[in-house]
Image: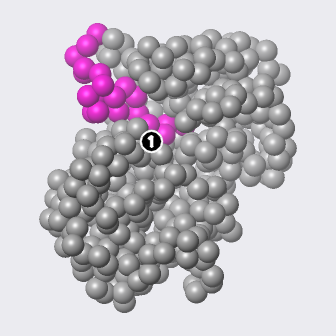
Amino acid sequence: MRVIILNQFFYPDHSAASQYMTDLAESLVEHGVEVTALSGRGRYNGGDRLPPREVYKGVRIERAWATSFGKGNLIKRLSDYLTFYLCATWKLLRLPRHDIVMALTTPPFIGLVALVIGRLRGMRVVALVQDVYPDVAVSLGALNRRNPATRLLDWLNRYTLRSSDKVIVVGECMRERVVAKVGEQLALRVRVIYNWADAREIRPLNGEGNSFAEQLEVGDKFVLLFSGNLGHINEFPTVLDAALILRDRSDILFLFIGEGVKKASVEKFAERHKLSNIRLLPYQPRETLRYSLAAADAALVTLAEGLAGLSVPSKTYASLAAGLPVLFVGDARSSIARIVAENNCGEVVAAGDHLRLARVLCDWASNKGKVAALGRAARATFERDFERSRAVSAYMETFAECMGDETSPEKNGTGVSDCKETSG
């Protein structure tokens, strides 16, 4: 089987989608699949341009040229998107024909390119939905729902999803949103495969030495960690207001590790209110992730109001793998909120309820036994539902179904359904 993975970012970029697709590509190669990753030459957060092609762990990487103005304003972002669309189209036309082309949602609507070229060249098309566009932009206020351009984008997205051979989504709540777009008659094409973490890379340290924690010099503080991109989809006002309430609790620390468009606002809030209980660090190398996670007592995961089913915070799975209780701030209908509540591996706090968030943190900071029990439940949830090998098997099954393999588990009625809330 030969598969193209189409996404604007791939190895060595450190964005979440890039890392997930790099993991997936490596595992597919180990399963005997020939994989070509088609991406851009830039990085999610800028930096040096990447070479036009290379081979990484058996994965052939082809990088399309595009402008790299960054996210400074809409014109620059549109330039980066449009030039990538054009050059990715040219690359797809020139690459050797593969069996399947799987397109993600970065940049938005790149799946339409995959669909047109895939049909032209006789390739199966799989849409992997990490974020639902243009719905995310509408919910964040970047687009007006009634604008004719927004309606056109929504029609294009529906057309792409309806026309794809398979649609993979990363949460059950997202599946509900996508099925509403494609129609119940096509619901069987939509499969839930959650994102994952690797049990070999991330695990509780259980008393092992942790130089990262020692360098932090947090002592016996209770550390609540937000690790990853501080992006538009995140809900920080509730968290910052809770930090303000707890400013005199020297035993509780809010630690942010990462970058993103909202990092500056977090920094300014902490500076304006002279909060010593907020600390920010830049991205850490991936190989140190297990140690940075182990330096915390609990993980913070947030999702802005209105985004339930439109985006799924992928940082959750590494936190579960590390045995950290998850403190989720956002809509209780979202997939992550359901996972936390149904598995009793943390707490769900509604956006805006900073008083309850502060109460939960005070309770956890003074009850190590409770936190330890929640952490054990988090690791058990991860091992059962969100380990990398489980997700890879689901992708392999989906590709086999897409190719019409009569021996695939689904066609024999032996496949494990991934369309329940705590599946992986």
Residue 75 percent coordinates (x, y): 44, 14
> Where is mark 1, residue-wise?
260
What is the quadrant of the N terminus in the image?
top right
- Identify which residue is drawn at 37% across, 42% down: 264
Q: Is residue 12 left or right of residue 77?
A: right
Q: Residue furthest bottom?
A: 369
Q: Choose between 412 and 171: the one closer to the eye.
A: 171
Quarter assignment of residue 377:
bottom left
Q: Choose between 423 and 133: the one closer to the eye.
A: 133
For residue 113, say whether it is visible.
Answer: no
Q: Tell me if residue 158 is in the magenta stretch.
A: no
For residue 336, say whether it is visible.
Answer: yes
Q: Is residue 403 left or right of residue 109?
A: right
Residue 108 percent coordinates (x, y): 48, 25
350 versus 141 height, above or below = below
Residue 221 percent coordinates (x, y): 38, 78
Residue range of the region highlighted in magenta in the rendering: 127-148
| Residue type for callout 1 | Gly
Q: How is the image coloured?
A: one colour
- Identify which residue is drawn at 16% across, 59% down: 353
